Image (tube, rainbow, N blue to C red):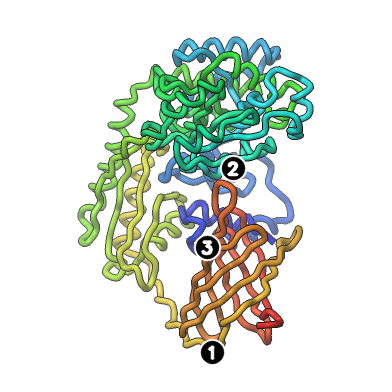
Amino acid sequence: MPHFWEQLRNSLTGASRRDLFRRGGLLALAQTLTSTAKAAPLELSSRLYESIGVRPVINARGTFTIITGSQSLPEVKKAMEEASRHYVNLDELMNGVGKRIAEITQAEWAIVTNGCSAALTHFTAAAIAGFNPERMQRLPNLRGLKNEVIIPTYSRNQYDHSIRMLGVTIIEAPDLATLEASINERTAMIYILAGLQDSGPFGTKAIVDVASKKNVPVLVDAAAEILTIPNVHLARGATAVAYSGGKCIRGPQAAGFLLGNKEMLQAAWTNSAPHHAFGRSLKVGKEEIMGMLAAIEMWVKRDHKAEWQGWEAKLAHIADKLKSIEGVTASVVQPSIDLSNRTPSLRVQWDGTRLGIWGQEVAKLMLDTEPRIVVANAAGARPGSKQSSVSIVPYMMMPGEEKLVADKLHALLTNPPKMANPAAAPAPTISLSGQWELLMDFGRGSAAHSLLFEQEGAKLSGTHRGEFASGDLSGSLAGNSVRFHSSLPTLGSRVSFEFNGALEGEQLKGSVNLGEYGQTTWTARRHKYA
């Protein structure tokens, strides 16, 4: 069944869904911790996490939810603590906060939500049901209601699940003409993912010009962007724009906010908790509401130029520490014009063969040993891919942590632990060509897939057919063992699989890594007609 600890390792080492899981230290630690007969009492101190067996990490990767985003500002912590001491009517609170955030951001109105994804859901509900309580109560039953959302093809992503959860039909538009032709009486809204394309000929302004003629609202998802004032997306005519609160703005991790049209945003609030509507489960508390307000108040007071200089100073310290290592280069990479996750980073490169350690090994050791440090973009694996690298992102590093990062990187690159190259793979002793019936056991349910293998020596290629889609597979054979990976398209994203197994009798069996979804087991038998 899916294994959380394997998923956690994959996320923390910065591996993509297509990268192989790196097993070992953390899993062993997890097994040790979970086998403890009696838990130690919770310590309300700097060792809060350690007291329950959790080891904190230094964040040299960026604002990723899997490592809890950002650290909230001191003013945010203070606002949340003070807010927790009083009772307040939530409708009155949101009205007051919405007005104040609107004043700060020069928007017409604002609401605070339980994260950016919740903001997308509430806006979609408002676009469908408005203020009509009968319609609200029917959601996600869309019979007789607007039930289509148009999304430019370039904007499809994992997060549009927050829109699809209302039961709407997604209409993809590859160009402006198709988008315009797709608008009809069933169209509830148009969704755009902010990025480099949203300012082009098929960007927000062009889409708004078309949508406004049909009175169709346009929502822009700018989750990880810096907050622009006046807002760049609203200036292009968007109805509303959604932000994450727990990224660069450094508000509460469980908060986000919407800026834009007052009527639509008040309808979005009505479709959320504390009201009995579809969004009831996406409740935002008074603490997050006031913490988010404090973060936005601080956004216009923070010295962003000084913060940038501070990030560059951290990277300069690390680069200076590494410059004496022959064969290692450290160069600062400046961000593109994109507004998301705007921060410089340090790319550290070396020849793995020359230094005796590869990029993925460095990332694993940085994570596994104390102090635990999460780095970004590890590349290079033994014994091939000798060109190795890791990146250091200073975005969320706290004061003094650059010294810990520099010292640890320096130690690993100058005196790496002894690691043996994997043994040469034996020649394959099996033939897998043909069609196989694949069964994956998820613990809670199973799924029947099929595999079509094409074998050329030790090389495998072919097709993996899932329950709803199919995709190419590729891999290799060694003796009677097999490794292959595949990727199947899904709504707005892809699901990746990393298979490891062996032929036992007439059956292939082994484990399959599912990226962020954990690990499970699989078996396969030749199709009876193959």
Circle 1 crowding by C-alpha within 10 Å: few under 14, some 14–19, many from 20: few
Mark 3 residue element: loop
User: Mark 3: few, some, or many residues within 10 Å (few <14, many ≥20)?
Assistant: many
Label 2 sits on residue: 49
Q: Residue at x 73, y 51 (%)?
A: 38
Sequence-first tag of 1 and 3: 3
Choose mark 1 or mark 2, whichever is in front: 1
Please name the amino acid that badge 2 sits on. Answer: Tyr
Give the answer, above or below, for where 18 lies relative to 139: below
The residue pinned by badge 3 equals 21
Which of the two discs, 1 and 3, sits closer to the camera?
1
The residue depicted at 34 percent of the width and 25 percent of the height is 304
Provide the secondary structure element on which disc 1 rests.
loop
Residue type, label 1: Thr
Quick one: SS at disc 2?
loop
Q: CA distance from mark 1 to mark 3?
A: 26 Å
Q: Is residue 24 visible?
A: no
Q: Above or below — where is 67 with respect to 281? A: below
Q: In the rendered image, which quarter is residue 7 located in? A: bottom right
What distance separates the C-alpha of mark 3 from that of mark 2?
25 Å
Which mark lies nearer to you, 3 or 2? 3
Q: Is residue 204 above or below residue 463?
A: above
Image quadrant containing the N terminus: bottom right
Residue ID at (30%, 46%):
346
Residue type at the position of mark 3: Phe
In screen coordinates, is 125 left or right of 341? right
Quarter in which the C terminus is drawn:
bottom right
Residue with the mark numbered 1: 429
